[in-house]
Image: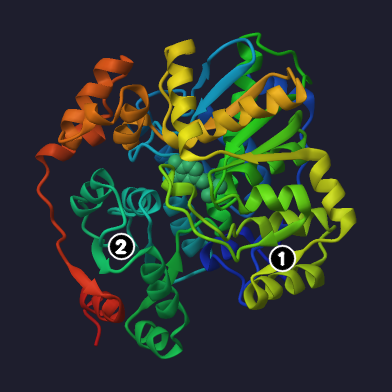
């Protein structure tokens, strides 16, 4: 299987090269040249298989240059009961006869980023070996919270790599900050940037595009790489859990083979929902994709009108991992819908860069609207979805999953569609304990209480176990206290790598 760039069909690389490189040189994203087809018989046989066997089934169809042994090693190292607390890895929770939550947050950092970032380091080191890369890989991350911690956990102590995470000084939650500054590992570093997420992100982008600095790193035996969701190595593991959810529904007799389901995904960068679309392209019976946004509803508007317009106010919401106005993975989706029209994609992405918006042709819009539905909700509706789900089902969901639930409920009242539906549950409610408890109780209830009191209150209310990785933060001493000006990020990298 070869990979093309969404902006140049003549580019043709192996999966190892695509994963090592992250982004194609002219700015396009790597996509597989075809989508392997699976039969209903094969899907049926997955129902008696473990998560790791299901992962092997899907991943081996894309990473065809990986040896069987290498691929199996990547999978067994990434998805263990020790790291995920359950053999199911991504268990399916049945709310009622229509609605199922696909719990993607059992990994070490309590958010769905672990599903990809636990395996990416193994993909990357295997790809380096396969392409005879001798340099040490330096992963640079700017994070608004979830990605930084998940990348640190994934890359800690992985030979041949080092990781540096920058987070905005006052832009992450207390739990998220504690998770990062107490990170252990012999190859990790964390620094706060004086500024907001954009400052951190721009600083990292600057380092990536500074040719002189890259040459300096090169001379010292280092190569920069990225762990964000444009990397094919982060997207492909996400296809697996949609097959796994379907297989679980078959195993428990909730559906019969071939029966179509709907999928609802709380969306930011469009990676998770794109993975479900790719699963359908491979043959998984999915009828509708419901794209759920918070008040940053740029995707809702796009799916309804065909106009993508990022020139709008940015909202800070209680579902911060979806506070995003540029959904990078949409590029892969449009490439696919347009029949791999690299010229059109280049044109649209240039327009996005220069004018802040673009409009897709009617034919592509029609295809999109046939499969995709979209809606959004505000913080109040998010809170109300958390409360209602608890009252009606005794089940507690986090703020991101609640956006999906709220949008799903609106979809059902609008369409009457009674298809069985899988909602992607993207974070543990404990990770956003404050907002969740305000929803379940009220504002006064949480006022003046610290994070660890709140964890216990949420445990008592929900009957769920506090994730070990959050509870133990209380006794961890912070290791990283560096705060840097946004102009000094390059120096921070140099200090860490001891280059000058
Ligand atoms: C990253 C994230 C999302 C958005 O996922 P995309 O793949 O970027 O669309 C949703 N919920 C949580 C909790 C996340 O961390």
Q: Residues within 10 Å of mark 2 (few under 14, many from 20)?
A: many
Mark 1 lies on a secondary structure that is loop
Write the residue at 76% across / 28% down.
285
Task: Name above or below for residue 115 compared with residue 62.
Answer: above
Report the quarter where the C terminus lies: bottom left
> Horizontal and vertical percent for residue 146?
38, 48
Dot 1 or dot 2, earlier in sequence: 1
Q: CA distance from mark 1 to mark 2?
A: 31 Å
Q: Are marks 1 and 2 in contact (CB under 8 Å)?
A: no
Query: Image quarter for residue 255?
Result: top right
Q: Mark 2: which secondary structure? A: strand
Residue 58 % position (x, y): 64, 38
Query: Which residue in the rendered view is the most extreme toward the bottom?
Result: 212
Residue at horizontal 65%, vertical 51%? 299
Residue 92 appears left or right of 199: right
Give percent across and percent down for residue 40: 78, 25
- Within 10 Å of disc 1 (Cα), the crowding (few <14, some 14-19, many 20+) is many
For residue 116, say whether it is visible. no
Task: Check residue 35 in the rendering and tell me which mark sits there, or answer none.
Answer: none
Report whether the residue tagged 2 is closer than 8 Å to ligand 1.
Answer: no
Q: Nearer the viewer, residue 443 or 486?
A: 443
Taking 23 as reference, is 117 above or below it? above
Q: Which residue, given by chain and number where applicable, does mark 1 sit on?
A: 6
From the image, tell me which residue sits under label 2. 168
């Amino acid at each position: 299987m070869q990979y093309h760039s969404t902006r140049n069909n003549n580019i043709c690389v192996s999966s190892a090269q695509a994963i090592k490189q992250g982004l194609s040189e002219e700015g396009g994203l790597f996509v597989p040249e075809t989508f392997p087809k699976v039969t209903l018989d094969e899907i049926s046989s997955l129902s008696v298989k473990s998560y790791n066997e299901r992962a092997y089934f899907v991943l081996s169809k894309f990473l065809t240059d990986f040896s069987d042994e290498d691929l199996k090693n990547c999978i067994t190292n990434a998805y263990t009961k020790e790291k995920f607390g359950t053999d199911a890895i991504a268990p399916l929770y049945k709310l009622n006869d229509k609605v199922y939550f696909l719990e993607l947050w059992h990994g070490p950092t309590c958010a769905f980023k672990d599903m990809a970032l636990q395996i990416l380091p193994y993909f990357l080191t295997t790809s380096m070996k396969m392409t005879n890369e001798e340099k040490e890989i330096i992963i640079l991350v700017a994070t608004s919270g979830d990605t930084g911690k998940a990348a640190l956990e994934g890359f800690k102590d992985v030979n041949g790599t080092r990781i540096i995470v920058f987070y905005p000084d006052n832009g992450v939650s207390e739990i998220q900050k504690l998770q990062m500054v107490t990170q252990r590992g012999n190859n990790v570093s964390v620094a706060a940037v004086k500024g907001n997420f954009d400052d951190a992100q721009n600083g990292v982008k600057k380092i990536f595009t500074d040719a002189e600095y890259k040459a300096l790193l090169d001379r010292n035996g280092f190569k920069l790489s990225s762990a964000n969701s444009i990397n094919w190595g982060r997207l492909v593991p996400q296809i697996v859990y949609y097959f796994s959810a379907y297989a679980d529904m078959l195993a428990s007799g909730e559906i019969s083979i071939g029966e179509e389901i709907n999928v609802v995904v709380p969306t930011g960068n469009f990676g998770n929902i794109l993975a479900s679309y790719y699963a359908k392209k491979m043959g998984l019976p999915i009828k509708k994709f419901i794209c759920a946004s918070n008040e940053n509803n740029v995707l809702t508007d796009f799916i309804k009108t065909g106009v993508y317009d990022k020139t709008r106010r940015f909202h800070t919401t209680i579902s911060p991992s979806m506070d995003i106005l540029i959904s990078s993975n949409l590029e892969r989706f449009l490439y696919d819908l347009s029949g791999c029209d690299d010229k059109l994609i280049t044109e649209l992405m240039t327009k996005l860069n220069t004018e802040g918006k673009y409009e897709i042709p009617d034919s592509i819009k029609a295809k999109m609207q046939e499969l995709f539905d979209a809606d959004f909700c505000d913080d109040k509706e998010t809170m109300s979805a958390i409360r209602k789900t608890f009252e009606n089902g005794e089940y507690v969901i986090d703020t991101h999953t609640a956006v999906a639930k709220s949008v799903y409920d609106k979809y059902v009242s609008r369409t009457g569609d009674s298809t069985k539906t899988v909602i992607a549950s993207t974070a543990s409610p404990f990770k956003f304990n404050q907002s969740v408890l305000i929803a379940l109780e009220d504002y006064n209830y949480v006022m003046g209480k610290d994070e660890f009191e709140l964890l216990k209150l949420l445990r008592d209310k929900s009957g769920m176990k506090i994730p070990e990785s959050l509870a133990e933060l209380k006794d961890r001493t912070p290791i990283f206290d560096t705060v840097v000006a946004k102009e000094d990020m390059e120096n921070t990298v140099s200090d860490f790598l001891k280059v000058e």
